[in-house]
Image (cartoon, rainbow, N blue to C red):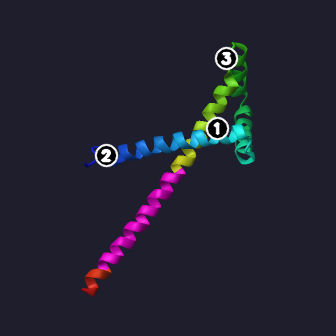
Amino acid sequence: MASTQSPDEQRDAKLAELTNDRAFMILAALKAGAEQNTKLMIQDVSEFLADDQALGQLIRDTANGGNAFHDLLQKLIWTEAERQAEQELAHIARHNKELSIADRVHRYLDRVAA
């Protein structure tokens, strides 16, 4: 059965799937104490906290009884997950293009040989 989704819709669906997978893996790695993921989150949180306005909002939200740091961490995890998913999609697209070119070359060579 043929897909009724446009290529953009298919890409968006794949991006959402990969982002969910990546976010789950990053969170699991953080919970397990994975050094690389922890360093990445430390860097992201440090960049966020360097912004006085953002830090002020984080403090206000926490003072108002929210779990602002948890929310911030979740946002940073999802941002990183989407970045990684975009990279993977780009890799897949390059790979598919390479296969497409190789397939065309093989078909051409088959026609020439025939």
Q: Looking at the image, which residue is at 42% across and 62% down?
A: 96
Please name whichever residue, 62 or 103, is drawn nearer the observer in this view of the structure: 103
For the residue marked with disc 2, what is the amino acid? Ser
Picture coordinates of residue 90, whole percent (x, y): 49, 55
Q: First in sequence: mark 3 or mark 1?
A: 1
Which residues make up the magenta segment? Answer: 87-108
> Magenta region's main secondary structure?
helix
Measured in 3D between alpha carbons, the distance from the residue under mark 3 to the one under mark 1, in whole angstroms, is 20 Å
Q: First in sequence: mark 2 or mark 3?
A: 2
Disc 3 on helix, strand or loop?
Answer: loop
Q: Is residue 113 above or below residue 29?
A: below
Residue 27's disc number: 1
- Residue behind mark 2: 6
Left or right? Give the position of 102 relative to 2: right
- Neighbours of disc 2 within 10 Å: few (<14), some (14-19), many (20+): few
Please name whichever residue, 83 or 32, is drawn nearer the observer in this view of the structure: 32
Q: Is residue 37 above or below residue 66?
A: below
Measured in 3D between alpha carbons, the distance from the residue under mark 1 to the one under mark 2, in whole angstroms, is 32 Å
Please name whichever residue, 73 or 46, is drawn nearer the observer in this view of the structure: 73
Picture coordinates of residue 80, whole percent (x, y): 60, 42
Residue 66's disc number: 3
Disc 2 on helix, strand or loop?
Answer: loop
Picture coordinates of residue 4, whole percent (x, y): 27, 44
Residue 84's disc number: none
Q: How many marks?
A: 3
The quarter of the displayed image where residue 109 is located:
bottom left
For the residue marked with disc 3, what is the amino acid? Gly
Name the quadrant of the C terminus: bottom left
Measured in 3D between alpha carbons, the distance from the residue under mark 2 to the one under mark 3, in whole angstroms, is 41 Å
